[in-house]
Image (tube, coloured by chain):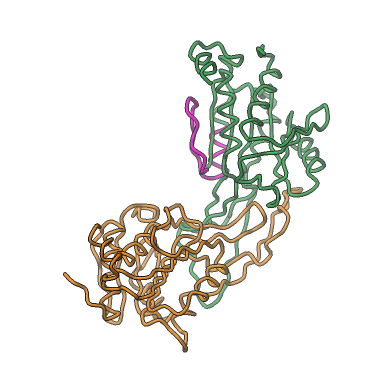
Chain colours: A green, B orange
Amino acid sequence: EIIAAMERFFDVGPLAGRRVLVTSGPTHEPIDPVRYIANRSSGAQGTAIAEALRDLGAEVVFVTGPADAARPNGVQVVEVQSAREMHEAVMGALPFEAGVFAAAVADWRVASASDAKIKKIGGKLPVLEFAENPDILREVAQLTDGRPALVVGFAAETNDVVENATAKRARKGCDWILANDVSPATGIMGGAENAVVLISDGGAESWPRASKRAVAEKLAGRIAEALGAVVRA
Amino acid sequence: EIIAAMERFFDVGPLAGRRVLVTSGPTHEPIDPVRYIANRSSGAQGTAIAEALRDLGAEVVFVTGPADAARPNGVQVVEVQSAREMHEAVMGALPFEAGVFAAAVADWRVASASDAKIKKIGGKLPVLEFAENPDILREVAQLTDGRPALVVGFAAETNDVVENATAKRARKGCDWILANDVSPATGIMGGAENAVVLISDGGAESWPRASKRAVAEKLAGRIAEALGAVVRA
């Protein structure tokens, strides 16, 4: 870690001078002033990835939803709440050479979000209408102008992990998908470890279960290689 | 605080030997394994009330949703996630002499909660159907057998605070309502201060804006009086 810090100081990491973006954490979609829809992403994996890329010398833009994980040092932190805010922050951060989209972005928002608290009167149930949120990963992956050299998505699945993630990669047009099984039984969501499958042109590559930090370091090394950086042993 | 600790130690606080219940924090209502509906309650006010009642010598049962606030010491903590779990915990804690229902309980849950992650396929939007959650405050306030001597509800309002809270008190059948204005502009939700109106038989009594701790101590003193405890000056 001291070597990493010195490398950063002397700007000699393999990703020195390379600009990368990482999204992380959940998004919160308001229902009314006091209620919102959230998801169980802790931001732990995205934060570890931002740190690992930073440690290789990259200039990291870290766009994070309201996550529990402490914000990483030495990166540019952009705090957002909703998917639409995250979309705006990512688009505003272009151009970057690699984008890692680890945030658990809400697919939809409440179209009928209310400015006043929805009241419970006479047993009438609320009706929530949804609208689709911008698909940040797809939009960046399919940029015709200024597309990052490497676009990495995540897939949080609860069943048929490789199949679903492979389909997602094709649908989005991204280069890699890091897929994991977030079924409650795995303890991955909110936990310290991750077990991922890297889906790329080359097929599906299972990585052994490891700490989220170790997964992040492995991914950062792969990203450096993909960007043509010289990674010293 | 040392005197309070000594009083607790020697069991001589005005509420010594009196069993009270406090609910606190938000509830989380699952949509699927990774998504849920939450609300912005930090648990700060409920936690402060539990501490203030403890400091008067009460035996406190503290039923809390997944709140950010650190759990109080010296009370019995019961952790729950959903409104239905909170209902079960409260009913299981009966009998108690006073109940303070400070939790921001979700009025409704997702009836169609899914065991697998809801997928975004072909732009089809999900349809969420809701079911009413148990009304914990009303159920306790209207117990014919074993009703606590004092039932205190909270009303988080964004408009017509006194009017809405007075109507809520009548609807629930509780003794007191502590009403506050949680409009984002007030900074109360998630903030350190509170400005409440106590709605009782005697009408509406506005308390000056103060720290949540000061509001809690004032409320605890009133509860002790209402329970006929001798509060020393």
Q: Residue furthest left?
A: B233
- Residue that appears at 71% across and 35% down: A178
Taking depth in this image into account, of B110 and B153 the one nearest to the observer is B153
Q: Residue furthest front?
A: B10
Q: Quadrant of residue B22?
A: bottom left
- Residue that appears at 67% across and 56% down: B32
Q: Is residue A81 magenta?
A: yes
Taking depth in this image into account, of B53 and B192 the one nearest to the observer is B53
Q: Is residue B71 magenta?
A: no
- Residue that appears at 49% across and 27% down: A76
| Residue interval drawn in magenta | A67-90
The quadrant of the image that shows the C terminus of chain A is top right
Taking depth in this image into account, of B173 and B1 the one nearest to the observer is B1
B115, above or below B98, in the image: above
Q: Is residue B158 left or right of residue A6?
A: left
- Measured as percent of width and height from the top left, residue B208 is found at 23, 62
- Measured as percent of width and height from the top left, residue A138 is found at 69, 36
- Measured as percent of width and height from the top left, residue A127 is found at 60, 65
- Measured as percent of width and height from the top left, residue A211 is found at 64, 35
